[in-house]
Image (cartoon, grey):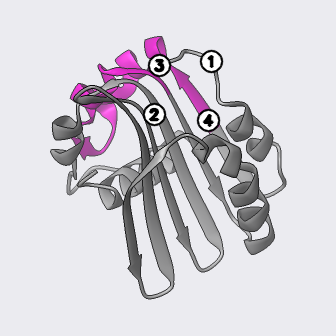
């Protein structure tokens, strides 16, 4: 399961290239309880230990800027629609930074600006019947996010 979440994280963040509080996002927790949904919450302490082991170049630098990260992935259309609706409350007050559409999928990147940094960043990837979502909180440098790239040959 660890490797599965690493792949989800790498894929979701890599798709979002271009793109404060320590508490878990309540909406993510609720969506994570739905059937056919995988969910993980990582605190600052955990992120400091796993950031460099993710199959994404530059993720260790991003992880050092985070206070928390949450990742969820659905595996059915029904759970994707329900989770997307639940996560709507997380998007309130966030600015849509990027919207990308291709074939049967979309990528939306939302953020909360704090001067020249982002205090929150949410990436939603929806395609066909799967939703992948990542919520990052901290003092995030947008330039660091742009430097993230998947590493080839790592699982």
Give how far apart the Cα atoms at labels 3 and 2 are.
9 Å
Of marks 2 and 4, the one in the foreground: 2
* Residue 40 badge: 4
Q: Where is residue 19 in the image (x, y as percent from the top left)?
A: 28, 50
Q: Position of residue 141 (x, y in %)?
A: 23, 30
Residue at the (38%, 25%) spot, across then down? 50
Residue highlighted by disc 1: 23
Give how far apart the Cα atoms at labels 1 and 2 are.
11 Å
Residue neighbourhood size for the residue with mark 4, other residues' Cα within 10 Å, grouped as few (<14), some (14–19), many (≥20): some
Of marks 3 and 4, the one in the foreground: 3
Residue at the (80%, 70%) spot, across then down? 78
Residue at the (82%, 43%) spot, across then down? 33
* Helix, strand or loop status at disc 4: strand
Q: Nearer the viewer, residue 61 or 150?
A: 61
Question: Do tag 3 and tag 2 residues touch (Cβ < 8 Å)?
Answer: no
Give how far apart the Cα atoms at labels 3 and 1 are.
9 Å
Of marks 1 and 4, the one in the foreground: 1
Residue highlighted by disc 3: 20
Give how far apart the Cα atoms at labels 1 and 4 are.
13 Å
Q: Bounds of the magenta span?
A: 40-68
Q: Earlier in the sequence, mark 3 or mark 2?
A: 3
Of marks 3 and 1, the one in the foreground: 3
In this image, 26 relative to 72: left or right? right
Give how far apart the Cα atoms at labels 3 and 4 are.
18 Å
* Residue 136 badge: 2
Q: Earlier in the sequence, mark 3 or mark 4?
A: 3
Give how far apart the Cα atoms at labels 2 and 4 are.
12 Å
Q: Position of residue 45 (x, y in %)?
A: 45, 11
Whether residue 25 is situated above or below residue 154 in the rendered picture: above
Q: Which of marks 1 and 2 is nearer the N terminus?
A: 1
User: Does the stretch in magenta take in 67?
Assistant: yes
* Helix, strand or loop status at disc 3: loop
């Amino acid at each position: 399961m660890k490797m599965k979440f690493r792949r989800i994280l790498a894929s979701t963040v890599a798709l979002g290239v271009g793109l404060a509080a320590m508490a878990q996002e309540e909406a993510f927790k609720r969506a994570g309880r739905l059937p056919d949904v995988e969910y993980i919450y990582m605190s600052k302490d955990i992120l400091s230990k796993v950031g460099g082991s993710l199959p994404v170049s530059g993720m260790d630098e991003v992880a050092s800027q985070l206070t928390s990260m949450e990742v969820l992935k659905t595996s059915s259309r029904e759970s994707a629609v329900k989770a997307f609706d639940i996560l709507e409350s997380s998007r309130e007050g966030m600015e849509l930074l990027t919207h990308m559409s291709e074939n049967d999928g979309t990528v939306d990147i939302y953020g909360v600006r704090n001067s020249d940094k982002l205090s929150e960043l949410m990436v939603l990837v929806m395609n066909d019947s799967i939703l992948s979502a990542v919520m990052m909180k901290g003092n995030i440098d947008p330039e660091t996010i742009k430097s993230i790239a998947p590493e080839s040959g790592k699982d």
